[in-house]
Structures are given as structure tokens and as C-alpha cells.
Amino acid sequence: MLGFLEAYLKRQTSDPPEVLGHFTSLSGAYAIIETGRVRLTHCSCLNDSTERSYGEARISSVFRRMKKRSAQTRKILTDFAWYRRKRLDDIFVFCLSEVRGSAQRTQLDGALSQWRAYADGGHGALLVFRMNQLAATELMRSARTSFSRVTYDPEEQEFCIEQLTEAFLLMLTNDNEGILKYYFATDLDVIVTLMKDERFSEEREWRVVVDNGYRSPDDRELPIRFRDSNGLKVPYVELSVRANDKYARIPLAATVVGPAVANKDAALASLHYFCGEHAASGQVIISKTPFRNR
């Protein structure tokens, strides 16, 4: 609606990698392979509990600077902050990361820090997707979907928020205030979901972000489901990673068994046959990342 988000995403997705990987538990990997669907977690319930507060701090920093321009700008941004605080967002996220190696030349693998943080302490798996084929799936083609690399530079992050806010202030009138606040809040939610602290920059993360509040006659709202996690019922939505129909292959370049899995040979054989049974393409291999239990 504001135009800036579309231009920002286009810049951020120029020259995407050939492959991107998703770290998960072994049970999560089996579920994706069996169903051909992935779970997108609500943005407030991601693994890093500080992400939300980090993004909100960037917004607050930008708004504080811009409020100094005039009394009118201060009032508009103060009113909007209250509006956004009362609003429940509908943003869901599927995380992908750049991986080590190449689908053609060398073994695909993940960084030790990511194995520890996102793959059940190294006991999980890494699903490596071929991005040119994943682009043809429901996950990437939904009208609700945004796809972008994550930004880690705080100056770039605040510049993006400021440019989006400038567009909002320029377009705002008494006639469009209600709808424009809605679109500005939604675009802000998407952009801050694509921002992380620079200390996580080695993860080289990309994200699929779904706005489940998006209204389109051709794209129905996705049903919200819940999974158990540390005593919480975590909301998520599902989208397919098979192209066209349920019989298409899942576009995997590789399924990588985690470096801390106790019986790697058994896991290798199990996943090899399971992938064959459920039409998941790609090789099944064991991670070569050096791993020692802490």
C-alpha cells in the first residue's frame, strides 16, 4: 500500500542463493517430508525471545528522532504508537539460512552455532531447499508471502524504518487515516521481523514472512493451529512446499543429519528410505561439523 515495502523487498532479494537451509528437530524433519508442508511460527514466539524487543527498540529510536521535527509529527506518531500497541499482529515466519558448501561441488552443511541453537542442540536435521524450485510452491507464491534476507546493520535498519515512516506521513490525510494506519502497522511488522541484532550476522538468515491478516478474494485466511513448546501453545500456520499438487516432489538439495545425533548410520538409513517413500528429492548425508557436548 505504501510502496516502500515492495521496493525494499525487491532490493533485499536480488541475487538470492541457489540453496537455503532450514534447521529443525528430527521429528520436525520427518513431519515436513511426510506432509510436504512447513510450519510458520507467530513472530512473537520465535526461538530468540529478544528479537521482538530488538525490533521495537529500532522503531522507538526512529520515532524519537522524527517527533522532534514538529508538534504535528509528534502527535501523529504518538497516536500511531498507541494504535499499534493495541493491535494484535498476524505475522508468521519460516526461517532459512545460507549454508556451507554447494549443491554441485561440496557437501552442504550448517554452522556449529546454528546446529546448537536451532536443531535440537545438534540432534536434529538440516533441510536444504533448492530455491528456484521452492519459488513455485504455495509457501512462496501466496499473496500473503514476503521473502527477504535478514538485515543485521542497525543503521540500515533504522534507515528503512525512517523511509517507511516518511511515506506514511506524506500520504496521511483525514480521509485515509484508518486504512493507512493499518497498512503502515502491517508493513512495520514485516520489516522488523526481517531485522536481527548484528551479533547474529554469521547466521546469514533469510525469512519467509506471511501476513495472515492480508485480505484478498483469491487468498483465504490460513487456519491458525497450535503446538506445545515449553508449556506454551505456540500459534502457527502451514503452507505447502510441493509445487502444484500433493504428488510433486519436495525440492530438497539435501537432508543433513545433525552432528550430535547418537546413531548417525541409523538416522541416515531411516531418512534415506523415508525421503524415497514421500517423494523428497536430494541426497541424505551426515553433517561433518565438528561437535562436542558442552
Image (cartoon, rainbow, N blue to C red):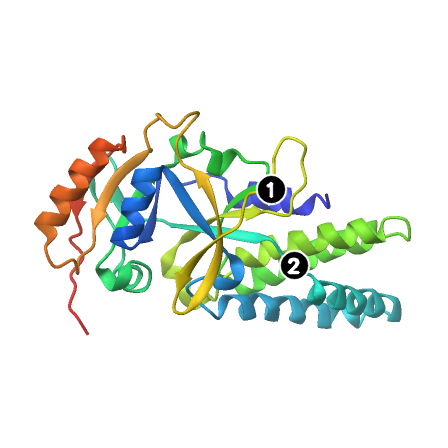
Residue 144, given in percent of the width and then of the height, sits at: 58, 41
Q: Which residue is mark 2?
A: 161
Left or right for 262, reference 236? left
Residue at 73% x, 57% y: name it: 165
Quadrant of res 79? bottom right
Residue at 30% x, 39% y: name it: 34
What's under tag 2, amino acid-wise? Ile
Mark 2 nearby-residue class (10 Å; few <14, some 14–19, many ≥20) = many
Residue 279, given in percent of the width and then of the height, sits at: 27, 30
Q: Which residue is mark 1?
A: 221
Secondary structure type for disc 1: loop
User: How many angstroms separate mark 2 from mark 1 (CA)?
Assistant: 27 Å
Q: Which sits earlier in the primary sequence, circle 2 or circle 1?
A: 2
Please tell me which residue lies in front, 200 or 45: 45
Q: Is residue 87 above or below residue 39?
A: below
Residue 27, given in percent of the width and then of the height, sits at: 27, 52
What's under tag 1, amino acid-wise? Glu
Secondary structure type for disc 2: helix
Please tell me whether mark 2 or mark 1 is closer to you in this view. Answer: 1
Residue 3, given in percent of the width and then of the height, sits at: 70, 43
Quadrant of res 285? top left
Mark 1 nearby-residue class (10 Å; few <14, some 14–19, many ≥20) = some
Q: Is residue 140 above or below residue 74?
A: above
Asked if the residue under mark 1 is in contact with the one under mark 2, i.e. CB atoms within 8 Å, the reply is: no
Please tell me which residue lies in front, 223 or 258: 223
Q: Is residue 61 above or below residue 139?
A: below
Left or right for 223, reference 15? right
